[in-house]
Image: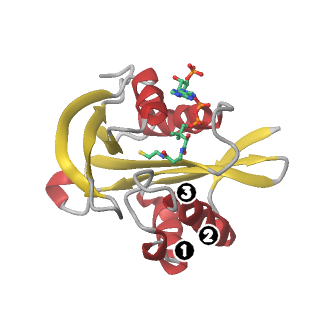
Amino acid sequence: MLIIRSARIDDAATLCAAEQAIAETPGRLISRPEELRLEAFVSLIEKLSGGAGCYLVAEDNGACVGHALLNPMELIALAHVYRLTIVVHPGHSGKGIGTALMRSICEWATCSPQVHKIELLVRSTNERALSLYRKFGFVEEGRLRDHVRLPDGSYIDEVSMGWFPVRADA
Ligand SMILES: CC(C)(COP(=O)(O)OP(=O)(O)OC[C@H]1O[C@@H](n2cnc3c(N)ncnc32)[C@H](O)[C@@H]1OP(=O)(O)O)[C@@H](O)C(=O)NCCC(=O)NCCS
């Protein structure tokens, strides 16, 4: 059974390994595999789970199958904007796990008054991710041309998308 729960420090190695595996496919994640370091996963889980944001894990029968996080921008003037990252682990895409994670992320944001906006960047070639974000009401705000350089020297665009939580008291 699929459950969505808060990330724990002892998830860090699994989440890091999953991102490293996905990053082996050029253009899927922005980071290259060697740029994804365990220490960074540990400190981000600590930061976000400690109240600064949201870090969720999808678990199926005890195994981590995906994760998603909302990380607030650093500057005071931008601190109402949270950057979304979502990753369904290799072998588990296309089974509704991304949808389940997005639903929980959007619910958390809607219940968190400090979140005014969620932003993300997605490679323009990632049709599945674009479909998922549109399904949850994310709107394209711009296109960053040749933003990502692939190992073969070619470039791909990134699409910037945004979403605003709608609250009953708004
Ligand atoms: C992109 C990603 C998060 C989507 O999660 P997922 O669990 O595979 O997605 P779901 O099964 O919940 O499907 C979500 C939607 O994607 C779309 N979709 C599913 N399979 C698709 C396919 N083969 N092609 C295009 N769109 C597809 C559909 O709109 C689907 O919604 P629907 O089933 O209601 O029609 C996931 O595949 C992933 O993490 N991939 C690798 C890392 C990555 O690309 N992260 C995003 C970087 S910005």
Cα–Cα gap, marks 3 and 2: 16 Å
* Residue 79 in the figure: left or right of residue 103: left
Q: Which residue is mark 1?
A: 42
Question: Most extreme residue toward the bottom, as rendered?
Answer: 39
Q: Residues within 10 Å of mark 2 (few under 14, many from 20)?
A: many
* Residue 115 in the figure: left or right of residue 16: left
- Which is more foreground, mark 3 or mark 2? 3
Q: Residue at x 35, y 22 (%)?
A: 169
Of callouts 1 and 2, which one flags the residue occurring earlier in the amino acid sequence?
Answer: 2
Element type where label 3 sits in the image: helix
* Residue type for callout 1: Val
Image quarter of residue 160: top left
Cα–Cα gap, marks 1 and 2: 6 Å
Q: Residue at x 43, y 56 (%)?
A: 26
Please say whether residue 116 is visible from this viewpoint: no
Q: Which residue is mark 3?
A: 22
Please say whether residue 141 is visible from this viewpoint: yes
Q: Residues within 10 Å of mark 1 (few under 14, many from 20)?
A: some
Q: Which residue is mark 2?
A: 12
**What quarter of the picture does the C terminus occupy?**
top left
**Where residue 14 appears, x then y in whole percent?**
67, 66
How many numbered marks are there? 3
- Which is more foreground, mark 3 or mark 1? 3
Of callouts 3 and 2, which one flags the residue occurring earlier in the amino acid sequence?
Answer: 2
Residue at mark 3: C-beta within 8 A of ligand 1: yes
